Amino acid sequence: MSNTSQSLFDRGMKVLVEGVSSASRGPATFGGAPRYMSHGQGARLYDVDGRAYIDWMMAFGALPLGHAHPRIVETVTREVARGTHFATALEVEVEVAEMLVSLLPHVDKVRFANTGTEAAMAAFRLCRGHTGRRKIIKFEGHYHGWWDAVLVNTNPLPPTMFGHPNDPIRIPDSSGIPEEAWKDTIVVRWNDFDAIETAMRLHGAEAACVVTEGVMSNMGVIPPKPGYLKHIEDLCRKYGALFYLDETVTGFRLAAGGCAELYGLTPDIVTYGKALGGGLPMAMIGGRADVMAGLEWGKVLHFGTHNAGRLALHVTKTMLETMLENDQAGFKRIKTLGQSMAAELTRVAKTSNRHGMVVQSVNSMFQIFFTDQPEINDFRDFCTHVDRVKFRNFVLRLFDKGIYMNPSATLHSLSAIVHTEDDIKATAKAVAEVLDEMP
Ligand SMILES: Cc1ncc(COP(=O)(O)O)c(C=O)c1O
């Protein structure tokens, strides 16, 4: 542990809750002081003592271009000199919306927000306003931001608390959430064809929407079973519920068209965040014209002083242009790098098989699970079979070898266009060393 990080943590603990501003950055996740970072460049993060790390967290996926990309630096420098925020109508707002509508065939109109949580709150209200129905169907282990109605069963639980797969016990993830907030939220086991069919039979006619992550990315990386997401979409059509695909993690990550493109889906409504802003806070709600029309004239209300911030929109535009040019070379590159990283880690796992390490990935996203199972297919598998303490100890050891990942096994790692095959080799070498050193 660096001395400077430790002394900043000691100071921070006196004035910040847990010394940080989100639990995933502080002692709840790190078990003690986190590494304090001072700057980033390309694929590297540098801590306050000047140590370099290959960054595989990339601000939880917000940085497909990596740190301080010259085009982002140029954009911010140019635009900040012209004013940070006006809260007026903007040309760049129209331009970025046009880009999004032309890229995403299921999106006729968009509305900008700042964070994934905010976009989701507006989207859920819109689903209810559009359908006139109250119920929200969500899945175990899926996170859609920290809004009361959907902050249930998103944290790992002991297996005795799961309840029947077709009728999971609903457990809020926070105190301070009154039962009324989630009484209309139905929780369903994910990746289970029967469970969603049963839930729709029971609640489909009263459901405003079924919301799903395209890839389960808040329990590591768990891909959907073949045909599963389409099955949800078909059930939504059958029962008149909106199919809401939460692309906060997967949007402008797994493909230019997100999970909808990857798995051939036509969601009625989507939300984006993270990568969309290229490092600045930017999110959006998008969908079919008749659904989005619900927001007109504040019928379904969504306000925000910082909506469509001009600096963030200019960065979004630059991020999209950079990722899309040369026939979407940026998306192809992060996919190739992610797949290569996953293959290297799998190779290392096989040679150091003492620890039961399994790697799961989809394109640019990957996660390491310490488990005795050949694969992890859903929340229940994750909670029952993944050793999260071991993962944290493993990542803390990687820090000393110049590799940065988040120590929470529920999160995941990501490639950015600035990573290289050398970074992958260096990471695989460090992982092999740590596996050898670990008890
Ligand atoms: C799938 C998903 N939806 C929504 C959110 C909330 O986004 P934000 O943290 O920007 O509020 C997250 C955040 O991790 C997420 O993973």
Image (tube, rainbow, N blue to C red):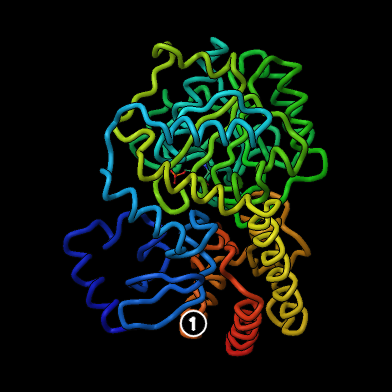
How many discs mark residues in the rendered view?
Answer: 1
Q: Is residue 76 left or right of residue 216?
A: left
Element type at mark 1: loop
- Residue 347 or 141: which is nearer the viewer? 347
Q: Position of residue 201 (x, y in %)?
A: 73, 19
Residue 128 visible here: yes
Is residue 386 depicted above or below 87 in this figure?
below
Name the residue at 74% across, 81% down. 353
Residue 439 visible here: no
- Residue 385 or 93: which is nearer the viewer? 93
Is residue 102 depicted above or below 191 in this figure?
above
Q: Amino acid at mark 1?
A: Gly
Q: Quadrant of residue 211?
A: top right
Local crowd at mark 1 within 10 Å, few (<14), some, or many (≥20)? some
Name the residue at 22% across, 77% down. 7
Q: Position of residue 73 (x, y in %)?
A: 39, 60
Give the residue number, with chain letter if any, for mark 1.
402
